[in-house]
């Protein structure tokens, strides 16, 4: 499809095509980045293994239409997740694209490239999670605006984490943008969300207080259930041992005759 040629390209002037190409560049994508390993065999030397970043996303089509579209796209797309040992890289429009990655992989991304990421999905469902490593990695991500954590544990395990993260962010990353600004007065400009692996519910800054109430309620109900189970267990053991004479001899005999009906906790 060449501008000024035959077919559909003749229907619009170059200015319209430039606007179309700009709109194509603004289509958001979610790029799933993984770490791959390959073994390199060189005759006369020992085989060695090298790692590189890979993803299933193809090159954006706007980069492949014609010279005009590529020129426009290269102003918005940048090469990221590069590797010095291979020619692998990924085209990313940092303003609209979201990167999905594991923390262990993100730690291996060049600091200069991490600093450009704005939307991030951290997949913690199959990956280890280290708070100290997460903070150290985020320390250099000055452009980050959104972080979604796909948790492998229930949201109750993350209680208090958002407040802890905010306190760390104010003292470590926030002042980098404006060192003169008081960190305590800086507004939160990073949206952090945690997704429950079972219910897919989301905990973020807006509903954190509601989740605290819910966690407290669930913990209270769990204690009540445990107390009830403990009382039932003590009652059953008392009946089986013949110590609970106040339950009556008939009841005690029934439990002795049918022990299979007694549920041990």
Image: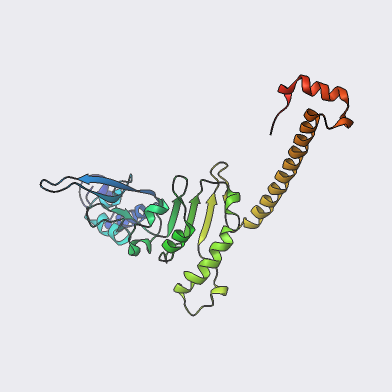
Quadrant housing the C terminus: top right
Between 93 and 240, which is closer to the camera in this rendering?
240
Q: Horizontal placement of 227 versus 39: left or right?
A: right
Between 87 and 71, which is closer to the camera in this rendering?
87
Residue at point 52%, 57% (across, down): 192
Between 207 and 245, which is closer to the camera in this rendering?
245
Quadrant in the rendering for residue 138:
bottom left
Between 167 and 179, which is closer to the camera in this rendering?
167
Query: Residue 243 location, x and y as percent?
Result: 83, 32
Q: Confirm whether residue 224 shows in the render.
A: yes
Query: Residue 68 location, x and y as percent?
Result: 24, 56
Colour logic: rainbow
Q: Confirm whether residue 10 shows in the render.
A: no
Quadrant in the rendering for residue 229:
top right
Is the residue 171 above or below the residue 213 in the image? below
Query: Residue 204 location, x and y as percent?
Result: 57, 56
Q: Horizontal placement of 127 versus 14: left or right?
A: right
């Amino acid at each position: 499809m060449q501008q000024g040629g035959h077919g559909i390209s003749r229907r619009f002037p170059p200015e319209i095509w430039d606007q179309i190409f700009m709109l194509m560049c603004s289509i958001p994508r979610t790029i799933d980045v993984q770490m791959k390993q390959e073994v390199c065999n060189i005759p006369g030397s020992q085989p060695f293994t090298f790692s590189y970043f890979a993803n299933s996303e193809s090159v954006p089509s706007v980069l492949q239409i014609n010279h005009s579209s590529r020129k426009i796209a290269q102003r918005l797309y940048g090469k990221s997740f590069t590797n010095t040992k291979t020619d692998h890289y990924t085209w990313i429009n940092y303003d609209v694209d979201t990167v999905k990655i594991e923390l262990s992989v993100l730690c291996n991304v060049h600091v200069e490239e991490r600093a450009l990421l704005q939307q991030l999905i951290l997949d913690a469902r199959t990956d280890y999670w280290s708070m100290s490593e997460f903070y150290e990695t985020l320390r250099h991500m000055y452009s980050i605006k959104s972080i979604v954590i796909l948790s492998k544990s229930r949201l109750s395990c993350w209680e208090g984490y958002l407040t802890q993260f905010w306190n760390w962010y104010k003292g470590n990353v926030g002042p980098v943008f404006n060192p003169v600004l008081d960190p305590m007065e800086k507004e939160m400009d990073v949206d952090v969300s945690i997704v429950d692996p079972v219910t897919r519910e989301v905990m973020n800054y807006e509903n954190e207080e509601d989740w605290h109430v819910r966690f407290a309620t669930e913990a209270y109900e769990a204690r009540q259930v445990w107390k009830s189970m403990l009382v039932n267990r003590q009652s059953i053991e008392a009946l089986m041992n013949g110590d609970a004479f106040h339950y009556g001899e008939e009841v005690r005999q029934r439990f002795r005759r049918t022990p299979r009906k007694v549920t041990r906790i």
